[in-house]
Amino acid sequence: MRTVRRPRRYVNSQLLTLLAPVFGYDERRDAYLMRGVGERVGPVLRVDRRVRHEPPLGGIDLRDRARAA
């Protein structure tokens, strides 16, 4: 029995739509596994729902001005 979990790879939903014939959804893992052999080998895919943080905007930070006053 496997003691180390396979890493999850996050992919966008459009790619999962294209891979639907090869990958099936497993509710227990909340991930997509390869059909036929996915319980033992192969990648474990998840929909990329992680929040992307935008880079800070350039310019004056008004919070610093409020602290200085």
Image (cartoon, rainbow, N blue to C red):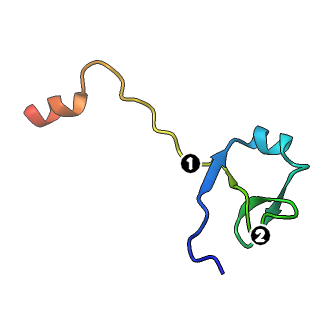
Q: Residue furthest left?
A: 69
Front-most of residues 27 and 54:
27
Whole-percent x, y for residue 42 in the image: 73, 58
Residue at 70% across / 53% down in the picture?
45
Label annotation for residue 39: 2
Instruction: Assign the N terminus to one quadrant of the image.
Output: bottom right
Task: Using residue 68 as the reference point, say whether residue 63 is left or right of it.
Answer: right
Please tell me whether residue 49 is drawn above or below residue 38 in the rendered image. Answer: above
Whole-percent x, y for residue 30 in the image: 71, 65
Instruction: Assign the C terminus to one quadrant of the image.
Output: top left
Front-most of residues 18 and 4:
4
Q: How many marks?
A: 2
Please tell me whether residue 26 is drawn above or below residue 64 in the rendered image. Answer: below
Front-most of residues 25 and 43:
43
Helix, strand or loop at mark 1: loop
Helix, strand or loop at mark 2: loop
Task: Using residue 31 as the reference point, say whether residue 4 is left or right of it.
Answer: left
Within-10-Å neighbours for mark 1: few <14, some 14–19, many 20+: few
Within-10-Å neighbours for mark 2: few <14, some 14–19, many 20+: few
Residue at 8% across / 32% down in the picture?
68
Task: Using residue 4 as the reference point, say whether residue 28 is left or right of it.
Answer: right
**What amino acid type should be assigned to the residue bearing mark 2?**
Glu
Which residue bears the numbered disc 1?
50
Spatial separation of the CA atoms under disc 1 and disc 2: 25 Å
